[in-house]
Amino acid sequence: MWWRLARSDFEKQKGSGNQGAFQKIVKHGPPPGLVAYADGQLVAWCALAPRESYPALGRSRILKPVDDRPVWSVTCLFIAKAFRKRGVSVRLLSAAADYAKRQGAEIIEGYPVEPRSGPMADVFVFTGLASAFRKAGYEEAARRSKTRPIMRRYLR
């Protein structure tokens, strides 16, 4: 819900309020993302939707739109600890592109981090790593911060 709400609304309903709001989205659709399984076990999550579903992106000077073309956005990736560093995020980013294309999208983009040096704490990479986006066929479209590229993949 971080990207879907005004900061004040997010803070106001922090915790169970945001969980309830997200459950309504899941229940009533459209689907807010994709999940990945391994041997029947849920191991990863990827949030994606048309960019206009995430008003917080439009308020960011770093993540403001690259141009006026409609895009789908990948805003969050979570990979279970036991499955990290196994290429799951790359496969999930590819699946996100395939899904967005089936929904009519021509461009999908993400807002990963590009570590300056060494590994980053997991909590700071919830939008993914730029290296995973590159491996999944996304290219840098803009960079307004040293550590935060906007990565795009053209689908048509």
Image (spheres, rainbow, N blue to C red):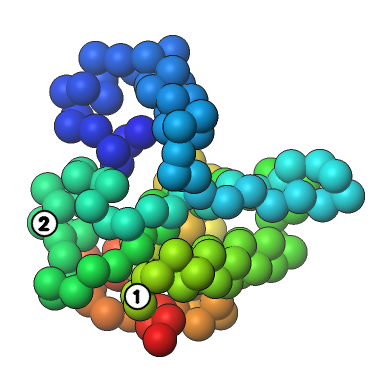
Q: Which kind of residue does numbered mark 2 sit on?
A: Arg
Residue 122 appears at what percent x and percent y?
53, 46
Q: Nearer the viewer, residue 100 or 42?
A: 100
2 or 1: tag closer to the N-terminus: 2
Which residue sits at x=48%, y=58%?
128
Residue 45 appears at what percent x and percent y?
59, 47
Q: Which kind of residue does numbered mark 1 sit on?
A: Ile
Which residue sits at x=27%, y=80%?
141
User: To which quarter of the image does residue 21 belong?
Assistant: top left
Question: Which part of the image, by quadrant, shows the N terminus?
Answer: top left
- Mark yes or no: residue 147 visible: no
Between disc 2 and disc 1, the foreground one is 1
Q: Is residue 55 above or below residue 136?
A: above
Q: Which residue is mark 1?
A: 107
Q: Nearer the viewer, residue 100 or 133?
A: 100
Q: Which residue is mark 2?
A: 61
Q: Residue 142's mark?
A: none
| C-alpha gap between disc 2 and disc 1 | 21 Å
